[in-house]
Amino acid sequence: MPPSVNRSNAKHYKKSPALTDYHEFEGRDHWTCGAPGWEAVADYPLTWARRHASTRHLHPTGA
């Protein structure tokens, strides 16, 4: 999918109450999992999720 389509999709989410973000990995194609340096790409969403994680939305039992 061309980056322009992904950027357009990301703009639609700006009106959503969901927490969203857009990050483009320059020079990467669709086969990231098989390319050198895939670890850095995998670390990005993990770091993002940890930064935005909140326990206030957990069920009272912690589930």
Image: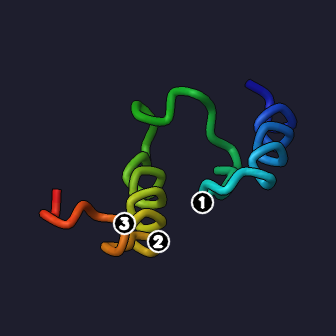
Q: Is residue 29 left or right of residue 31?
A: right
| Residue where numbered disc 1 is placed | 19
Q: Are marks 2 and 3 in contact (CB under 8 Å)?
A: no
Q: Residue at x 28, y 64 (%)?
A: 58
Could you classify mark 1 by the number of other residues whose Cα lies within 10 Å: few (under 14), some (14-19), or many (20 or more)? few
Look at the picture and state if 22 lies above or below 7. below
Query: Observer-nearest residue: 27 or 8?
Result: 8
Q: Mark 3 is on which residue type? A: His
Residue 38 position in % (x across, y down): 42, 46
Residues packed near mark 2 inside 10 Å, few (<14), some (14 to 19) or many (20 plus):
few
**Sequence-earlier tag: 3 or 1:** 1
Instruction: Point out residue 36 in the picture as x, y percentages from the top left corner.
Output: 43, 43
* Residue on which the image places disc 3: 57
Q: In the picture provided, is 6 more to the left or to the right than 28?
A: right
1 and 2 marks in contact (CB < 8 Å)? yes
According to the picture, the residue beneath numbered tag 2 turns out to be 52
Q: Secondary structure at mark 3?
A: loop
**Mark 3, residues whose alpha carbon is within 10 Å: few (<14), some, or many (≥20)?**
few
Type of amino acid at the residue the image marks with label 2: His
Secondary structure of the residue carrying tag 2 is helix
Residue at x 20%, y 66% (from the top left corner): 60
In the rendered structure, the answer to whether residue 13 lies left or right of residue 31 reads right
Disc 2 to disc 3, C-alpha distance: 12 Å
From the top left corner, tell me how far across and down residue 14 is, in percent.
Answer: 79, 54
The Cα–Cα distance between marks 3 and 1, rounded to whole angstroms, is: 13 Å
